[in-house]
Amino acid sequence: AQKVTQAQTEISVVEKEDVTLDCVYETRDTTYYLFWYKQPPSGELVFLIRRNSFDEQNEISGRYSWNFQKSTSSFNFTITASQVVDSAVYFCALRGGSSASKIIFGSGTRLSIRP
Amino acid sequence: GAGVSQSPSNKVTEKGKDVELRCDPISGHTALYWYRQSLGQGLEFLIYFQGNSAPDKSGLPSDRFSAERTGGSVSTLTIQRTQQEDSAVYLCASSWLTAKRGSSGNTIYFGEGSWLTVV
């Protein structure tokens, strides 16, 4: 069975602080894909990143960075120098490598950035 | 189309009525997904289409829920005899369908959702 766990329900930090959102996953697939999505107050789900299981290279995009650790089944997301516009619910998701596989989402982490 | 399009954006219906929600995926995307998100909650998987067939409909909560996809494109999610607990945002998503390792087709893109309120 596949499972995604986001243990942090809510996080609140002051603007300009760094913040890390945790994601732990479970899968028996040898090939799989991990995703992060952002859901701002307006409601739409915005794709942020996809990571393939066979590529453990970490990625940085501006203030965002992702740390994929296959050994601990984690795919954590860090926002550096947070801004108020980063306030949103962030979802981690997992898709198996089978051509007929759904995407499983974690329960989300609500991030609030205080000015 | 340029993105996943869903209609209606908002729907208020009386308990017991049937509703239909429509999803028009990104042009050329062969995979289509329906999810449900209740207020303040995470995403609940409903059904997944590969072309016109549904290899996984394990998330449909009851037999009042059904979905179809025709022509490998537009999909309709139907809820019969709506109940108040059906109130939620219904999200549709699409992607290319490929088992090719590492393909960007494995990313799914969401529509803006259909907000359903059952009164």
Image: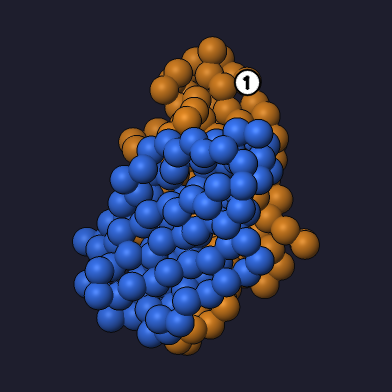
Chain colours: A blue, B orange
Instruction: Work out whether A108 lies above or below B100.
Output: above
Instruction: State the SS at label 1.
Output: strand
Count numbered badges in the picture: 1
Task: Pick whichever, A107 or B96, lies toward us.
Answer: A107
Q: Badge 1: few (under 14), some or many (20 or more) residues near its Cα, within 10 Å?
A: few
Which residue lies at the image location 47% right of the left edge and 30% below the top edge? B40
Locate the C terminus of chain B by quadrant.
Answer: top right
In the rendering, at what x and y percent does residue A5 appear?
A: 31, 51
Q: Which residue is mark 1?
A: B12
Which residue lies at the image location 67% right of the left edge and 72% below the top edge? B28
Q: Choose top left, top right, bottom left or bottom right for residue B81.
A: top left
Left or right relative to B79: residue B25: right
Which residue lies at the image location 45% right of the left edge and 82% below the top edge? A57
| Residue B30 appears in view | no
| Residue A9 appears in view | yes
In the rendering, at what x and y percent does residue B92 appear?
A: 57, 50
Task: Pick whichever, B54 or A13, lies toward us.
Answer: A13
Left or right relative to A109: residue B89: right
Locate the N terminus of chain B by quadrant.
Answer: bottom right
In the rendering, at what x and y percent does residue B93 appear?
A: 57, 56
Instruction: Work out whether B5 lies above or below B89.
Output: below
Which residue lies at the image location 38% right of the left edge and 85% below the top edge? A54
Q: Choose top left, top right, bottom left or bottom right for residue B32.
A: bottom right
Instruction: Work out whether B7 lies above or below B100.
Output: above
Question: The numbered mark 1 sits on a residue in which chain?
Answer: B
In the rendering, at what x and y percent does residue A107 appear?
A: 38, 44
Task: Pick whichever, B61 or A81, lies toward us.
Answer: A81
